[in-house]
Amino acid sequence: MKIAVVGTGYVGLVTGTCLADSGNTVICLDINAEKIARLSRGEVPIYEPGLEEIVHRNTASGRLLFTTDVSTAIAGAEVVFLAVGTPPLTDGSADLRALWSVVDSIAIHLSTTAVVVTKSTVPVGTCAGIEKRLKDRLGRDCRVASNPEFLKEGAAIEDFQKPDRVVVGVRCDDVAGVLRNLYLPFLRTENPFLIMSPESAEMTKYVANALLATKISFINEVANLCEHLEANIDDVRRGIGHDRRIGFAFLFPGAGYGGSCFPKDVQALAAMARKVGVLPRIMTAVHETNSAQKNVLGEKVLRHFRGIMTGKSIAVWGLAFKPRTDDVRDAPSLVLIDQLLAGGASVRVHDPEAMENVRAMYGDRLVYALTPLEAISGADCLVIVTEWGDYRRPDFDEMVRLLKSPVIFDGRNLYSDQEMHARGFQYYPIGKPPIHAVENRTMEKS
Ligand SMILES: NC(=O)c1ccc[n+]([C@@H]2O[C@H](COP(=O)([O-])OP(=O)(O)OC[C@H]3O[C@@H](n4cnc5c(N)ncnc54)[C@H](O)[C@@H]3O)[C@@H](O)[C@H]2O)c1
């Protein structure tokens, strides 16, 4: 099949690459000429495990192509995926300007049988809006479908190739058939191909993200409560997780959710509700709880130093909004860094993949360490924001030697309380009583 993918970001590039890998000819279109030039040279502009190898394999075979030219991409395409960004406007609703501009630019190049498919996360009713807009432009009905994407950055290839389910929102069986054929290579383990209306498909995507975000905000609120009541969130988590109605997934406390999806999708769902006169009480609380949670690590650091940050050197491990990605959009690390800089501290950061994205935002206001240990060298404390594998089993002896004082604020509860105690760290986890260092080992080194 000949496929066009419009928008070559995390979703578009993964979609295009995986569809080329399953035997289709795919042209990826983007307005970002630099991105397309890099991809055409064989450079992959984002970090996503396994992606580079599949991009290279398929560009070499001629099945995966990149362009900035709309007619080259769209003419002759049987399926056109729309995967441009839908960031939040100031009122929380989704900004669809990129999407509408794409719909307008592709219209005249569409073949009469082409199926236009929204992969971008878009408000309920957008698919119907695209059908209407194309009809107004072309004077004929066009085939439009919704096919929300559920991939997770950091595991995007695996998620695309082995989806839990594929959801398609269509108005007629033959469009469902086209999409089913396209997805067949990825459904060999009988994972469901769910057909519904475009409106239900659009809603499904928001509800999935909003429910996951709700679980995170819920457990974060409970964790904060545990800290005040001397309960231990690890024990509480175990206590509830074995209940099969509850389970363990997405109930890890932390520094708040970030990324390009949860924050904007929770707000967009709330905006949709307000627009039709429904009060989005839960979504509003989820968003507010998360915004407050992003301040928790910084507030603990500030309290530890009795509000005096000037002259302090703070190490931060983990900048990406989650491990195995370089994406820092809405990352909790950025809120922490802003708090520390505003307080007058100097900040030494490390991340295995996201350093360049953070450097583009902060320039020389931060110290960028090449290794985790280099980041903590001479620092007054360490704050862990993202649970990269690199940080799980560090050389604790070396850390005690390098830190000016052995103090760790752990936003992901990576270490055992017993080990922290035994090694003489002052340890501030999330949702658990802090470990106070043994007296003679906490004395500040000169
Ligand atoms: N990132 C994720 O994990 C994820 C997961 C599921 C769904 N989504 C949704 O998918 C959509 C895309 O997300 P993303 O993270 O890939 O975004 P992104 O910002 O990484 O990529 C969007 C791309 O679209 C391009 N673009 C913008 N306007 C264009 C135009 N007029 N013509 C051609 N290209 C244009 C941009 O240059 C950019 O390369 C969003 O709606 C998002 O909510 C994202």
Image (cartoon, rainbow, N blue to C red):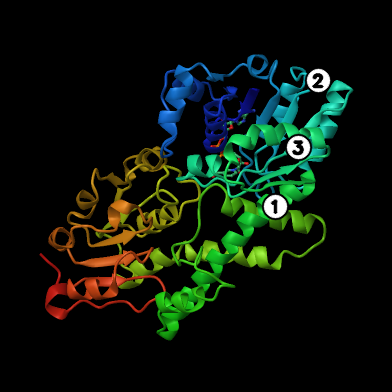
In front of the other: label 1 or label 3?
3
In front of the other: label 2 or label 3?
3
Instruction: Specify the label residue 435 is tagged with.
Output: none
Q: Amino acid at mark 3?
A: Ala
**Alpha-carbon span between mark 2 and mark 1:** 29 Å
Q: Is residue 371 above or below residue 266?
A: above
Label 2 sits on a secondary structure element that is loop
Residue extending furthest toward the front: 189
Q: Is residue 260 visible?
A: yes
Label 1 sits on a secondary structure element that is helix
Q: Amino acid at mark 2?
A: Thr
Residue 60 lies, in percent from the top left, at 45, 17
Residue extending furthest toward the right: 139
Residue 360 lies, in percent from the top left, at 40, 37
Instruction: Specify the label residue 112 is tagged with.
Output: 2
Q: Amino acid at mark 1?
A: Thr
Q: Nearer the viewer, residue 103 or 242?
A: 242
Q: Is residue 366 left or right of residue 329?
A: left
The residue tagged 1 is: 204
Q: Is residue 406 left or right of residue 430?
A: left
Q: Earlier in the sequence, mark 2 or mark 1?
A: 2
Q: Nearer the viewer, residue 40 or 379?
A: 40
Q: Earlier in the sequence, mark 1 or mark 3?
A: 3
Q: Alpha-carbon neighbours of circle 1 within 10 Å: few (<14), some, or many (≥20)?
A: some
Label 3 sits on a secondary structure element that is helix
Circles 2 and 1: CB distance less than 8 Å? Answer: no
The residue tagged 3 is: 176
Q: Is residue 302 above or below residue 26?
A: below
Q: Alpha-carbon neighbours of circle 3 within 10 Å: few (<14), some, or many (≥20)?
A: some
**Alpha-carbon span between mark 1 and mark 3:** 17 Å
Q: Is residue 133 above or below residue 361?
A: above
